[in-house]
Image: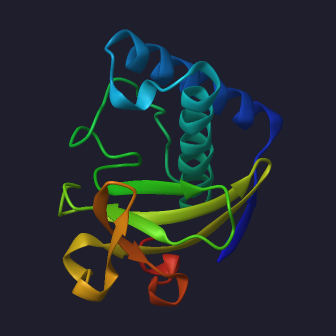
Amino acid sequence: MIEIKLELEEINRALSTAYERWSLSTRDKKKDSYTWTDGLMKHFYGCVGEMACAKYLDRYWSGHVNQYKGGKADIGMDIEVRHRIERDKDLIIEKNDPPNRVYVLTRGIPPDIEVVGWYSKEMVKKSHLKKMRFREVYCIPEPDLLDLKEIK
């Protein structure tokens, strides 16, 4: 696990991108639009996770918008970032997520973000399958995650 400290300019860029994503999502009546505060904050935390991961990997973060499930990867061609605010939460991979991507867990509240580890959908096990709210997802605990040096 690596601790990344985001600079104020990076946090501002993440907020700006989150606002664009939330605005388009709301306009298009997507399920992730939620309410003003919930929707915007979900997008914001996603953006800071993506930015922290890109910063650690020394890769460009495009902060693209209007790319829903199955569109462009969060970073490069194959990296998807999943951010959790709580520091004891698992990596979540959805059953309908693209199979040929790497999923990275980030956690925390800006400016201090943990880039925890990664996993691929091909590696998930039946034991990772959990019921979460009204759907089944793969929950990968931290001890199962792989070292980020392998994808750096």
Tell me which residue sits at (50%, 83%) in the image: 147
Q: Residue furthest top?
A: 27
For residue 11, side relative to residue 61 (left or right): right
Tell me which residue sits at (65%, 27%) in the image: 15
Snapshot quadrant of residue 130:
bottom left
Picture mark count: 0
**Is 33 located above or below residue 147 in the figure?**
above
Q: Residue furthest front?
A: 134
Question: In the image shown, does 140 or 99 lie closer to the viewer?
Answer: 140
Q: Position of residue 127 (x, y in %)?
A: 30, 88
Tell me which residue sits at (37%, 75%) in the image: 119
For residue 34, side relative to residue 97 (left or right): right
What is the basis of the colouring in this image?
A: rainbow
Q: Position of residue 129 (x, y in %)?
A: 29, 76
Q: Position of residue 28 (x, y in %)?
A: 31, 14
Snapshot quadrant of residue 53:
bottom right
Question: In the image shown, does 46 or 32 lie closer to the viewer?
Answer: 32
Q: Point out the image quarter for the N terminus.
A: bottom right
For residue 141, side relative to residue 112 (left or right): left
Q: Position of residue 122 (x, y in %)?
A: 19, 76
**Is 91 located above or below residue 112 in the figure?**
below
Tell me which residue sits at (54%, 61%) in the image: 57
